[in-house]
Image: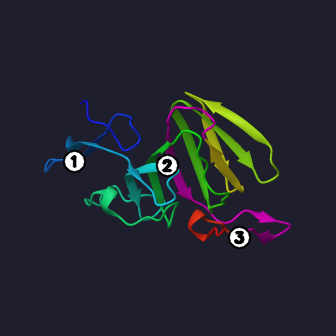
Amino acid sequence: MSALSDSGLPLVQRVVTGHDENGRATFKSEDFSPTRMISSGDASFLTIWTTEAVPADVNDERDGRDLPTGLTLERGSVIRITDMLPGKESPMHRTNSIDYGIVLQGEIELELEDGRKKTIRQGGIIVQRGTNHLWRNTTDKVTRIAFILIEAPAYRHNGVPLDEMKPEDVHD
């Protein structure tokens, strides 16, 4: 497959399994889809699958890509491919979720609210535990990351839950 996403990277292959009428494993679907630019212009996203709850209902026959989710996470879980564009950064944000980020291509800088930074390179994995952070691509190439977000209660500091600060809530 030679087609490209908005980011210039290859289309994302998605294979979904399920069960046939005899309860045996089967392939339900396969598709190749592009990531799509988000309104902030710093990245392009492709939602792969969403669940409405945790634990997930594997008997739900709907296509999880079609379930509603926000820019970050509304509830349940979501897996999304994010192509972070060269020289761009996300807004500072915090969500009530545990997020697993797997750098598939390139590298990304993770900055915490106090200014501390780490660079995560291809093959690296980030475990984001409800902290205030931003992502920055300091390179001249697109970075592709698979993010898996699972709903979690708010982090409690001295017994008080910290508020979410979703990117769509951030204003200049």
Question: Which sits in the foreground, 7 or 27?
Answer: 7
Q: Residue at x 54, y 37 (%)?
A: 102
Say if mark 2 contacts mark 3, CB within 8 Å.
no
- Provide the secondary structure element on which disc 1 rests: strand
SS for callout 3: loop
Q: Nearer the viewer, residue 162 or 132?
A: 132
Residue 163 — which label? 3
The earlier-in-sequence mark between 3 and 1 is: 1
Residue type at tag 3: Asp
Judge whether residue 156 is colored magenta: yes
Q: Is residue 72 left or right of residue 133?
A: left
Q: Residue at point 37% right, 59% down?
A: 57
Label ID, residue 51: none
Neighbourhood count class around disc 3 (C-alpha, 10 Å): few under 14, some 14–19, many 20 upward: some
* Three-letter amino acid code at the position of disc 1: His
Marks counted in the figure total 3
Residue 110 to residue 1: above or below: below
Q: In whole angstroms, how far apart are the C-alphas of marks 2 and 3?
A: 24 Å
Residue 106 at x, y percent in the picture: 54, 30
Residue at position x 50%, y 48% from top? Answer: 148
The residue that disc 1 covers is 19
Can you tell which mark lies on residue 43?
2
| Vertical comparison of 88 with 4: above or below | below
Give the image location of residue 170, x and y in percent.
64, 67
Residue type indicated by callout 2: Ala
Q: Which residues are magenta?
A: 137-162
- Give the alpha-carbon distance from disc 1 to disc 2, as whole Å: 35 Å
